[in-house]
Image (tube, helix red, strand yellow):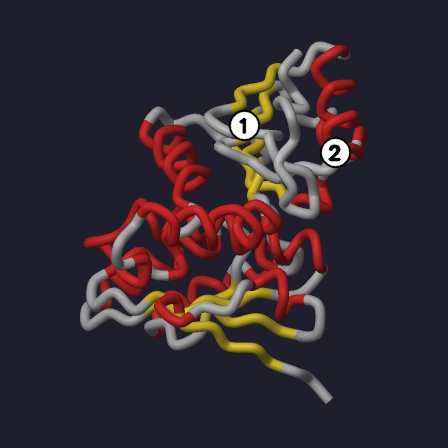
């Protein structure tokens, strides 16, 4: 039996949650035109690839569009990020069959920059912080609770800088050693163990960009007396 989990972005459950039990993940872009939101779609593909790689669960994307040219673009966007697609126009399928060897084990070119997506920060920090200061938190939408990391991703895209999204489970010496720069975009929640790994990464020459309240909370959401990465 294969458990297929299909996620629509406006009502999205967290991909990392369903990746623990699913055999196949699906992600839907609900924009009527892909070109309208192309930068966000590109960022989403990076995140999808991080989920696929870390949990070893295949990810496929569905794009809704009325124009064949847009569907072809969406197929190229997903394919170059190692993400499968369905519902594509015939020219895409023909091209992919002709060059099937390129899609047997799809991989993305790695960059020198890693952006950490923190599941714990989303759950223990943003879900409460947003509701503390925003009078109508539902207007943010679930997908907007973690926008700082996506903002960095868009900046790097605009500057044509290759980057990867990594997950909390990827914070280890082996994986971080592949990158020259690690970006913690308001990664408020970090465990003591993760802090030590990151500190060691910097001691060995890695560059760290940490913003706002990064490392101010431990893995339980409890506020520290000072930033764990204050040094």
Q: Is residue 136 left or right of residue 148?
A: left
Query: Is any part of residue 97 visible from this angle?
Result: no
Q: Residue at x 52, y 64 (%)?
A: 84
> What is the quadrant of the N terminus in the image?
bottom right
Q: Position of residue 229 (x, y in %)?
A: 65, 20
Q: Position of residue 114 (x, y in %)?
A: 58, 31
The residue under label 1 is 183
* Residue 31 in sight: yes
Is 59 in front, or is 102?
Answer: 59
* Residue drawn 76% across the image and 12% down it: 204
Q: Disc 2 to disc 1, how far (Cα)?
A: 14 Å
Give left or right: position of 56 versus 112. right
Mark earlier in primary sequence (2, 1): 1
Q: Does residue 110 appear left or right of residue 160 in this picture? A: right
Q: Give the residue at mark 2.
A: 194
Foreground of the two, 9 or 89: 9
Q: Quadrant of the C terminus?
A: top right
Of circles 2 and 1, which is in front?
2
Position of residue 160 in the picture relative to residue 190 (left or right): left
Say few, some or many: other residues with alpha carbon within 10 Å of mark 2 (under 14 / 14 to 19 / 20 or more): some
| Numbered marks: total | 2
On the image, the x and y values in percent for residue 223 come to 62, 36
**Considering the numbered disc 2 on the image, is that residue within a helix, a strand or a loop?**
helix
Q: Which residue is located at x 75 percent, y 11 percent?
A: 203
Secondary structure category for the residue under label 1 = strand
């Amino acid at each position: 039996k294969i458990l297929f989990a299909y996620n629509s972005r406006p009502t999205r459950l967290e991909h990392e949650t369903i990746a623990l039990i699913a055999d196949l993940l699906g992600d839907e872009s609900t924009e009527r035109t892909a070109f309208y939101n192309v930068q966000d779609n590109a960022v989403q593909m990076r995140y999808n690839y991080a989920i696929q790689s870390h949990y070893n669960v295949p990810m496929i994307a569905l794009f809704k569009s009325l124009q064949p040219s847009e569907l072809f673009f969406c197929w190229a966007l997903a394919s170059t990020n190692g993400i499968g697609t369905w519902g594509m126009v015939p020219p895409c399928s023909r091209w992919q069959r002709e060059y099937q060897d390129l899609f047997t084990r799809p991989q993305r070119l790695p960059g020198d920059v890693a952006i950490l997506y923190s599941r714990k920060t989303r759950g223990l920090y943003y879900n409460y912080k947003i509701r503390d200061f925003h009078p109508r938190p539902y207007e943010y939408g679930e997908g907007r609770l973690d926008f700082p990391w996506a903002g960095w991703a868009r900046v790097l895209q605009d500057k044509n800088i290759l980057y990867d999204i990594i997950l909390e489970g990827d914070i280890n010496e082996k994986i971080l050693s592949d990158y020259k720069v690690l970006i913690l975009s308001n990664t408020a929640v970090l465990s003591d163990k993760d802090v030590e790994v990151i500190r060691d990464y910097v001691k060995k020459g890695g560059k760290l960009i940490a913003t706002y309240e990064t490392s101010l909370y431990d893995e339980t959401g409890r506020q520290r007396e000072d930033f764990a990465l204050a040094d």
